[in-house]
Amino acid sequence: NGEYTWTAGNGLTYANHSTNVVAVDVTAEVDYTIMNTAQCDSAERHLSLVLHPDYNLTLSQTICERDEYAFFDTVLTTTGTYTRSALSSTGADSTATITLQVNPAPLAYIYYNNRNVTTVDNFCDAADMALEARSNITANYLWEDSSAAANRVVNPHESNTYTVVATNPNTGCTSLPATLTVTTVPVADLTISGDSVICAGQSATLTVADANNLDVTYR
């Protein structure tokens, strides 16, 4: 029983430790002399100890907005420097520091007739509709049909939804999808019937009919 003074072969001395294990920053195997300082008979003993080093880990990581980075038991989502203290597998005090950079995600928009739109109603069924993808940065685009050009022409029928995602070509970060919903109205399918041949001075009666039975106005 008693307290001990540890004297390492490298000249370092650690006093008043009541156990036979001392955590020191020595990374090699060192011989120690243990001397009892409890006013009792003392004896020098030589021990050969393997002293495990502390670990100081420095990391850097880049993620995109809305992504997460798991740092030990903490989920990181914002730019900053974070430090965590822990014990290594050998029981040595250790620290890990990470510098996290969160790159912003771009924004995506769908333009029709030079307006940013999310819905278009009463569009003529199957007519040409010219759409344009835009972003707040110079971006790459991907539509729901896997086309990649910023401009496309669609022919909506009844109800259709179009989406596009913008990607920053430098960081790889992607936007939330921009969505456009288009509802259409049917187009009249007209036929004209009546006498196609008459004599000079005669009159003919022509009948106009809509195959879709729409309420239309004739002009």
Image (spheres, grey):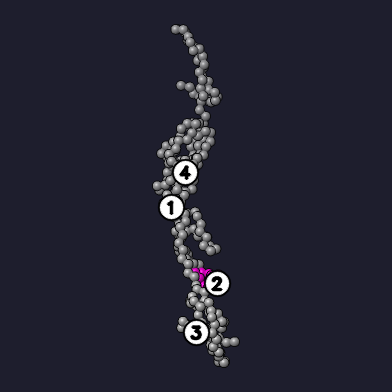
What residue range appears in magenta? Answer: 85-95
- Bin the neighbour count of mark 1 within 10 Å (Cα to Cα): few under 14, some 14-19, many 20 and up: few
Residue 206 to residue 25: above or below:
above
Distance from the alpha carbon under mark 1 to that under mark 3: 55 Å
For residue 158, say whether it is visible. Answer: yes
Distance from the alpha carbon under mark 1 to that under mark 2: 39 Å
Of the residues under marks 4 and 2, which one precedes in the sequence?
2
Question: Are the two marked residues, 4 and 2, in contact with CB atoms closer than 8 angstroms?
Answer: no
Q: Is residue 156 magenta?
A: no
Question: Residue sitting at 53 percent across and 80 percent down?
Answer: 48
Q: Amino acid at mark 3?
A: Thr
Q: Tell me the SS state at disc 4.
A: strand
Mark 4 sits on what residue? 142
Residue 2 location (% of width, % of height) = 57, 87
Q: Amino acid at mark 1?
A: Thr
Q: Amino acid at mark 2?
A: Thr
Of the residues under marks 3 and 4, which one precedes in the sequence?
3
Mark 2 sits on what residue? 90
Seen in the image, is 57 located left or right of residue 38? left
Of the residues under marks 3 and 2, which one precedes in the sequence?
3
